[in-house]
Amino acid sequence: MSQYHGCELPEELYYDLDYVWACPEGDGTITMGITDPAQSFAGRILRVRIKPVGKVVPAGRQVATLESGKWAGGVPLPFEGKVVARNEALLETPHLLNIDPYHDAWIARLAPTDPEHALDSMHTGEEAIKALHAWIDRYGIQCMRCTE
Amino acid sequence: MSHHDPLEEAFIGDHRRTEEEIKQLKTLVDQDSWEEALERARALRHALQSHIDVEEQWVYPKVDELASGDEDLERTLSILRKRHVEIPAYAEEVISAIEDREAEEAEEAIELLARVIADHHRTEEGDIFPLFMGDGPLKDVAEAAADALRKAHNEEIRA
C-alpha cells in the first residue's frame, strides 16, 4: 500500500485520477468508491445520495453525490453501467467514507455496458499513484481519517 | 458620489443572477413546467460556460501571475479551476434529468448545482475579486474583464 501525506493509495485499484477508485470483481461487475485524498478534501461527509439499483448511468454522469459542511460534489462514473448494488450503510452513516473509503465505504457496484473497455479511461499501478501524488500536492491535502 | 466598480457590477451581478436563475429553475420543476424548465436550464448552461470562459481568459491568468509563490492563493485557484470543470458537468446533469422529466433526480441535480455554485461564488468573491476592486493590485484590468463578460453575454443573446 502506497502512502503519501498520510493518504493511503492501494496500487491494485483503478483510478480516474480525481475522486474515484474502481475495483473489477470476478463476476464482471465493478465496485467503486472515493479515494482517501478525496474524502480528506471533502471533509466529514454528512449526506450521501446514490443512484438506485437498476439505474443505468452514462459515462461521466454522477452515480452518487456527497455533501459535507464545507464541500459538495458528484462522484462521476468513468464508464456507462447499471447500478447492481449500492451501499445502504452509507445512506445511514455517510461519514463511513471518512473512516474506511476503500472497504466498508464502497459506494456502488455496477455492471458495465461494455465490460471489455470499462476501465480503459482509468489508471492503475505506479503511473496512477504518481498522478495521485500530484493531485494531493495540487490541493494541499494531508489525509486524515475519522475513527468514529 | 457613487462608486463605479466594473468587476462588481459585471461578475458579482452575474453571480446573483445565476443564483436567482437556479431558484427559478427549481420552482419550474416543482410546478412540472418541464418545457420552460428545459429552456431555462439550457440557457443557464450557456451562461455558466460563458462566465467560466471569460474568467479563465481574463481573471484567473492575472491572479496566476500575482499568486506565484503564494501557496494558499495557488491552491485556491486550483480548486476554483476544478470547479470550472465540474460546474458544466453538473449543469448537464440538470438538463438530462429535466429532459427525462425525472422530478426527484432533477431536484437533486439542481440542489447540487446550487450548493456548488454558492460555494464557488463565495470563494471568488472573498479571495479573488477583491484583487480587482478598489485599490486592489489588479484594478487596472477590471474594466477589460467586465467588458469581455458583457460581450460574451451579448453574443449569447444574439445566438
Image: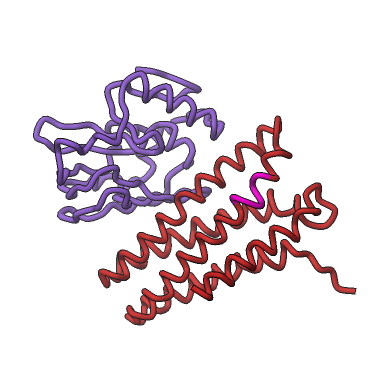
Residues drawn in magenta: B56-61
Q: Is residue A10 left or right of residue B84?
A: left
Image color mode: by chain
Residue A34: percent from left, percent from top = 35, 38
Q: Is residue B78 left or right of residue B22?
A: right
Which residue sits at x=25%, y=69%? B100
Chain displayed in purple: A
Residue B47: percent from left, percent from top = 52, 66
Q: Is residue A120 magenta?
A: no
Q: Quadrant of residue B78?
A: top right
Residue B43: percent from left, percent from top = 46, 71
Q: Is residue B20 left or right of residue B138?
A: left
Q: Quadrant of residue A37?
A: top left
Which residue sits at x=41%, y=69%? B42
Front position in the image: B55 or A24: B55
Query: Chain B colour?
Result: red
